[in-house]
Amino acid sequence: MLKNVPVLLQGYKMRVVEDPVVKTFTKDGKTEVATNQETGDPMYSVSIYMKPLPTEDGRRPAKGTEMKVTIERKPDDEIVDGAVVELHNPRISQFALDNGQTILSMRAAGLKLAG
């Protein structure tokens, strides 16, 4: 499985579509906070709409997609729904689910306002 593959996103505009929240998971019927294995700090989840920028020759970009991204540290308070952002050190990883499906997840070291 692929793990922590760096991703280049310079050709994309990214807009927050749901405010960041602390990432949680359920284990043995109990809800737990997901933490960074290196620091022990809580991780966050944010929904972002990613859309390609227009091409240099002015052609309209392809349609975008919404994706949940795990953020490894607390985002600044100004990162709210509607904010245009950049991801710091974005990576993708591949996981196999119990039902045989394979999924990709995106993770980033941080999140900041674009510009």
Image (cartoon, grey):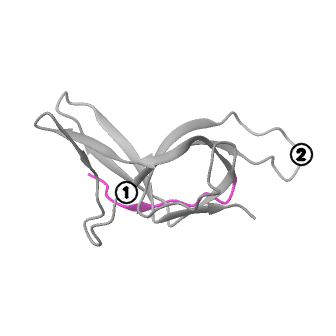
Judging by the rendered image, the residue that carries numbered circle 1 is: 43
Residue in the image at 34% along x and 38% along y? 103
In space, the residues marked 1 and 2 are separated at their CA atoms by: 39 Å
Can you give x and y, in whole percent of width and height, for residue 105 in the image? 39, 46
> In this picture, is 94 found above or below 87?
above
Residue in the image at 47% along x and 62% along y? 74
Residue in the image at 85% along x and 53% along y? 56
Q: Earlier in the sequence, mark 1 or mark 2?
A: 1
SS of the residue under disc 2: loop
Amino acid under disc 1 = Met
Judging by the rendered image, the residue that carries numbered circle 2 is: 58
Is label 1 in contact with label 2 (beta carbons under 8 Å)?
no
Closest to the observer: 11 or 28? 28
Can you give x and y, in whole percent of width and height, for residue 88 in the image? 54, 66
Can you give x and y, in whole percent of width and height, for residue 78 in the image? 65, 57
Verify whether residue 52 appears in magenta: no
> In this picture, is 101 found above or below 13?
above
Splitting the image into 4 quarters, where does residue 82 fall?
top right
Amino acid under disc 2 = Gly
